[in-house]
Amino acid sequence: MRATVGDQLVQHGRVVGQHDKVGEIVEVLGRDGDPPFRVRFEDGHEGICSPGPDTQIRHRETVTRH
């Protein structure tokens, strides 16, 4: 799973009723776009993420801006 700064990281909810968590990748800490990533989530907090199977990367060119 590769990403660049500005891509979105989406952690899908694991149980019914749990919402997806969306954040912007603000730093790529691995080599050549690999994890871990520093992510700023919609609620303002930042964290280091090593994405699992319930995670999706939305690359900048595919992210719809309104």
Image (cartoon, rainbow, N blue to C red):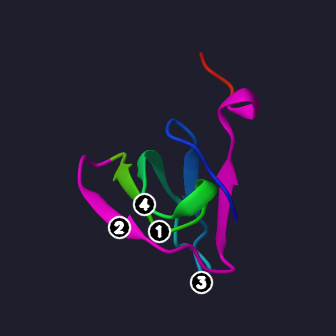
Give the number of the disc on residue 36.
Answer: 1
Which of the marked residues, 2 or 1, is nearer the chain's N terminus? 1
User: Which of 54/26 is in front?
Assistant: 26
CB atoms at circles 3 and 1 under 8 Å apart?
A: no
User: Which of 61/36 is in front?
Assistant: 36
Residue 22 at x, y = what percent? 49, 52
Instruction: Give the residue drawn at x 68%, y 61%.
Output: 56
Q: Amino acid at mark 4?
A: Leu
Which of the marked residues, 3 or 2, is nearer the chain's N terminus? 3
Q: Amino acid at mark 1?
A: Pro
Label 1: element kind? loop
Q: Which residue is mark 4?
A: 29
Q: Which residues are magenta?
A: 43-63
Give the number of the disc on residue 50.
Answer: none
CB atoms at circles 4 and 2 under 8 Å apart?
A: yes
CB atoms at circles 4 and 1 under 8 Å apart?
A: yes
